[in-house]
Amino acid sequence: MIDRSKLPFDDLTEHEKLIVVRSELSGKRYVPKTDEEGFALVRDLLGEKLFRGFTAARLEVAARYRCRPRWGVCSGWKLFYRFECGGDYLCGICVDERRYAVRIRLDRRACAAFERLRDTFSRDTVQWAYDFAPVHGGGRYILLDPEHCGLEAVFRVLALYRIPDRPI
């Protein structure tokens, strides 16, 4: 990883800055300074087709929930775009090379609701992701791949945790 403190970062060309930022991504602790920078990095990591999927998921969360998006850090992923409602974590979109996933927090109540509705979710995508999600304080953080399970399944699971402010 390149140490920025030893570089005249402001004097670098845009291409050189991109190289420095990409090297920082390998440390998995980089937080973009602006949405423009973050979305450019996401496009670079995912490619155009997956970037459209990322954008659709991001815009759909914003359309259904009154929440504040911001860039953050999520262990094991290069970039993380998180959504908070009233200061509470709602969900986030994790990004890595050529893949992204929506990370949803399910508390005890939402896990109980999922168990009641388990058979209505796809076994090979949603149920599997739920079963292998780590348990934290009686709840789980489930990772769903919208490219495989579809955005509607993502939002059905998310609605177990928090009912949308603006149903679509």
Image (cartoon, rainbow, N blue to C red):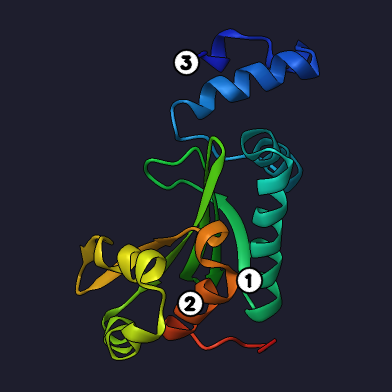
Residue 1 disc label: 3
Residue type beneath disc 3: Met
Answer whether labels 2 and 1 touch (C-beta < 8 Å). Answer: yes
Residue type beneath disc 2: Leu
Occupied quadrant, residue 104: bottom left
Name the quadrant of the C terminus: bottom right
Q: Which residue is mark 2?
A: 158
- Residue at 57% across / 67% down in the picture? 150
Q: Which residue is mark 1?
A: 61
Position of 62 with respect to 145 (left or right) is right
Answer whether labels 3 and 1 touch (C-beta < 8 Å). Answer: no
Residue type beneath disc 1: Val
Expressed as whole percent of the image width and height from the top left, the position of residue 41 reads 67, 36
Q: Is residue 122 visible?
A: yes
Q: Element at badge 1?
A: helix
Query: Which of the two discs, 2 and 1, labels the residue nearer the N terminus?
Result: 1
**30 to 115, vertically: above or below:** above
Occupied quadrant, residue 44: top right
Q: Is residue 141 visible?
A: no
- Label 3 to label 1: alpha-carbon separation: 34 Å
